[in-house]
Image (tube, helix red, strand yellow):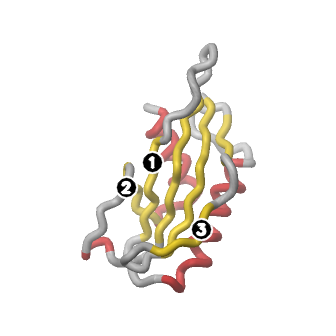
Amino acid sequence: MTVYEAFVDWLTAVLGETYEISTGQWVDGPSLADTRIAAVVQNGGPPVSVDDRRQRYRVILLGPRNGRQHVSTINQNIESLVQAAMGDAVPCGAASVRAIGEPVGPGYTTENRAWYSLDLEVLF
């Protein structure tokens, strides 16, 4: 299992099955109009120190199209990631997950999807 796969498993465990996971930026289309999207973008990380790898990810949570009314739910979901990162639940093989900073948002896409983003670091 790769670091990315373990991180996505952790993300799914925290958020449940309510989000469609997108590796990198999502491609919007009519079939995704009612779908909540969790875009996971790998942001590299610092150099390997001894045997420690610290992968960084940006998670962007988006609500359904034309769904400005979902902004508070998206905010609650991003906050649940912050809380989980401060807890003991970590991906398989990881030592820790921590939020790098605070959530960014709300924002709105041209399709009127409410979004929040959060940067996280996984120590392996």
Residue under the point 31% across and 71% down: 32
Residue under the point 69% across and 56% down: 102
Q: Nearer the viewer, residue 42 or 2?
A: 42
Element carrying mark 3? strand
Element carrying mark 2? loop
Percent across and percent down for residue 113 are: 44, 75
Precedes in sequence: disc 3 or disc 2: 2
Say left or right for 108 vs 80.
Answer: left
Q: Quadrant of residue 105?
A: bottom right
Q: Nearer the viewer, mark 3 or mark 1?
A: 3
Percent across and percent down for residue 58 are: 52, 50
The dot on residue 25 is 2
Q: Residues within 10 Å of mark 3 (few under 14, many from 20)?
A: some
Element carrying mark 1? strand
Instruction: Determine the CA span between mark 3 and mark 2.
Output: 17 Å
Q: Name above or below for residue 63 compared with residue 16.
A: below
Say left or right for 6 vs 121.
Answer: left
Q: Which residue is mark 3?
A: 105
Q: Amino acid at mark 2?
A: Gln
Residue under the point 25% across and 76% down: 30
Q: Which residue is mark 1?
A: 41
Residue under the point 58% across and 28% down: 46
- Which part of the image, by quadrant, shows the C terminus? top right
Percent across and percent down for residue 19 are: 45, 64
Instruction: Determine the CA span between mark 1 and mark 2.
Output: 7 Å
Precedes in sequence: disc 3 or disc 1: 1
Q: Residues within 10 Å of mark 2 (few under 14, many from 20)?
A: few
Percent across and percent down for residue 114 are: 50, 75
